[in-house]
Image (cartoon, rainbow, N blue to C red):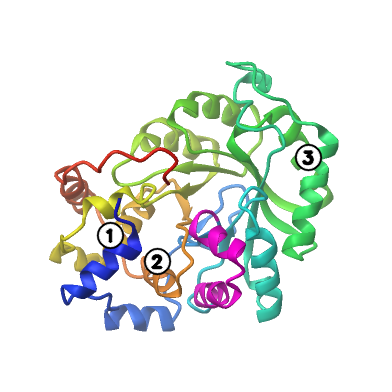
């Protein structure tokens, strides 16, 4: 399967290497970026951040600190703030915390991490729904949160979400305690499995959440119908994961140019095209694509400049992607 790095290499060979529109560079330099309000407080955050899973966590495990230093520097210097990580992302928490401290920019980052010592269970009412999901040990859960404070090297974490709907009664309860103490500013819960959306809806209705984290991409739009309207109704912020569709979108656009008309709303690369689609939904608060490449980071944050596509343009964007050939089957164990 073609990934983003492969796609950029192919494009460069064809004489279409990534370039940034001068208007975009001007917008980045003037910090003319799109922000969205977190409904529970009104605090505004930039709409594009950085995800610490996958390529970022792989680089962290390899000890490639210089590479990741440039990614974080590029993110913050160009107006993005949200860094989403998790204890389950290998060395991602520890390395990002170390780099931010070394660069003196820890207080410019909106730190988002996760909690789960229960595995991938716990969606239904009382967290004891279908499939007898695993339960979380409170002592282990608190220990994991404390390790996150140590690894991120911060006395206050902006957001902690329960990862993969793991035992909401226990783990959301613990996060509510941290929030009441002022050590965690926002709390939430995540899933990237469409089969768990009914469980997510149940949790959203039952618990006082500031955020949810969910998968959403131009070729994976189910959340817009099943989840986003409820988030808007309840005043819950939405953090979007996997806006490139686990790399399948790169395979689908291989050898194809971005439509020229997309430049009207500032999308001159496929990454910007995909991210502009995600942030165009009014329920979306922030999108956190993962990368371990500073050039990709700059490309991503560029999507938060310029205007948002209008309804007619969004429909055209969807038509473009829906008419692409389907992605090749995923190999077992592949991302």
Q: Residue at x 68, y 20 (%)?
A: 126
Dot 2 crowding, Cα within 10 Å, few <14, some 14–19, many 20+: many
Residue bearing the label numbered 1: 273
- Please tell me how crowded label 1 is: few (under 14), some (14-19), or many (20+) other residues with Cα within 10 Å: many
Compared with residue 154, is residue 38 higher up or lower down, i.e. above or below?
above
Secondary element type, mark 2: helix
Mark 2 vs 3, N-terminal side? 3
Residue 280 lies, in percent from the top left, at 34, 53
Residue 245 versus residue 302 in the image, above or below: above
Q: Which residue is mark 3?
A: 141
Range of magenta residues = 53-76
Whether residue 40 is visible here, answered yes or no, is yes
Please state if 295 lies on the left or on the right of 77 as rendered.
left
Mark 3–mark 1 Cα distance, whole angstroms, equals 39 Å
**Residue 221 versus residue 103 in the image, above or below:** above
Residue 300 tag number: 2
Crowd class of label 3 (few under 14; some 14 to 19; many from 20; radius 10 Å): some
Foreground mark, 3 or 1, reads 3
Q: Is residue 75 left or right of residue 248?
A: right
Q: Does the residue at mark 3 contact the one at mark 1 (Cβ under 8 Å)?
A: no
Q: Secondary structure at mark 3?
A: helix
Q: Secondary structure at mark 1?
A: helix
**Separation of disc 2 and disc 3 at Cα?**
33 Å
Q: Position of residue 169 (x, y in %)?
A: 72, 28
């Amino acid at each position: 399967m073609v990934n983003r790095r492969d796609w950029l290499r192919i494009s460069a060979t064809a004489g279409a290497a990534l370039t940034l529109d001068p208007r975009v560079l001007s917008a980045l330099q003037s910090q003319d970026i799109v922000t969205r309000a977190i409904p529970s407080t009104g605090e505004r955050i930039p709409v594009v951040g950085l995800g610490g899973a996958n390529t970022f966590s792989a680089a962290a495990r390899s000890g490639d600190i210089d590479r990741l230093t440039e990614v974080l520097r590029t993110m913050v210097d160009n107006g993005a703030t949200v860094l989403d990580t998790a204890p389950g992302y290998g060395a991602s928490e520890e390395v990002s915390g170390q780099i931010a401290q070394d660069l003196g920019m820890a207080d410019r980052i909106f730190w988002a991490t996760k909690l789960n010592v229960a595995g991938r269970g716990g969606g239904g009412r009382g967290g004891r729904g279908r499939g007898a999901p695993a339960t979380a040990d409170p002592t282990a859960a608190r220990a994991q949160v404390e390790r996150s404070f140590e690894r991120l090297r911060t006395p206050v974490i902006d957001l902690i979400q329960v990862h993969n709907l793991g035992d909401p009664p226990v783990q959301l309860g613990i996060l509510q305690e941290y929030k009441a103490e002022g050590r965690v500013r926002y709390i939430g819960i995540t899933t990237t499995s469409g089969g768990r959306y009914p469980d997510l809806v149940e949790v959203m209705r039952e618990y006082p959440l500031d955020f949810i984290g969910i998968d959403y991409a131009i070729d994976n739009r189910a959340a817009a119908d099943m989840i986003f309207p409820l988030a808007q109704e309840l005043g819950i912020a939405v953090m979007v994961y996997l806006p490139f569709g686990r790399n399948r979108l790169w395979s689908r656009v291989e050898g194809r140019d971005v439509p020229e008309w997309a430049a009207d709303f500032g999308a001159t690369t496929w990454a910007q095209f995909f991210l502009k689609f995600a942030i165009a939904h009014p329920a979306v608060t922030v999108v956190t694509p993962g990368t371990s490449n500073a050039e990709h980071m700059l490309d991503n944050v560029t999507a938060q400049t310029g205007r948002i596509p209008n309804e007619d343009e969004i429909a055209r964007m969807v038509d473009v992607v829906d008419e692409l050939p389907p992605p090749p089957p995923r190999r077992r164990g592949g991302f």
